[in-house]
Image (tube, rainbow, N blue to C red):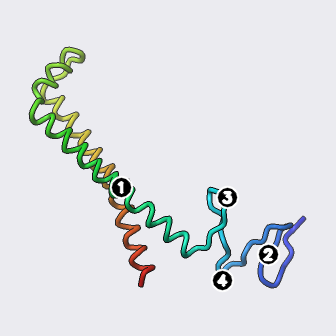
Amino acid sequence: MGFKLDRMAYSLGKKVVPPLGADHCYPTKTWGGSYMDNSSNANEMLEAIEPVLIRCFVIGVFVLLFWFSTLWLAGDLAHSIHSKIVLISQQQFNAIHYAGMLMFKMAIFVLFLLPYIAIRLVIRKRGN
């Protein structure tokens, strides 16, 4: 069973695969099983994801601010509690939390803010 050449596409059985460089757009199947065209439903999907990403970013910033303020206001208390469980100096405790806050900040920027900016740029470009 091999590929047979058709005028518009290469076909294998019943599945039609568009040729390379095809100017027209074939509908693609989404995860839900329905077909979508590449313009209207993709825009709707991007517009639905956009507020979720910015809300996740804002929540992440609030968590980071809570973490920082907790360590700033009650860092000695937190260190005294943790030093009873694990032998750790104040400098090590501060360094661990500083590194954790740095990694968390980088994660919320990379996972939420950068995709949000990219989606905003795509929506703006498609709108023109």
The tag earlier along the polypeptide, 4 or 2, is 2
Q: Which mark is residue 11?
A: none
Report which residue position mark 4 lands on: 24
What residue is pinned by disc 1?
112
CA–CA distance in space, label 1 to label 2? 40 Å
Residue placed at 58% from the left, 73% from the top? Answer: 38
In this view, the residue in front, 89 or 82, is: 82
Q: Type of residue at label 1?
A: Phe
Residue at position x 31%, y 53% from top?
57
**Viewed as shown, does residue 95 lie left or right of 1?**
left
Q: Which residue is mark 3?
A: 33
Left/right of residue 23 with respect to residue 9 in the rendered view: left
For label 2, count other residues whose C-alpha is less than 10 Å away and answer few (under 14), some (14-19) or many (20+): some
Give the residue type at disc 4. His
Does 125 sit left or right of 96 as displayed? Answer: right
Q: Which residue is mark 2?
A: 10
Q: Is residue 94 above or below residue 18?
A: above
Q: Earlier in the sequence, mark 1 or mark 4?
A: 4
Question: Sequence-wise, which precedes: disc 3 or disc 4?
Answer: 4
N-terminal-most mark, 3 or 2 = 2
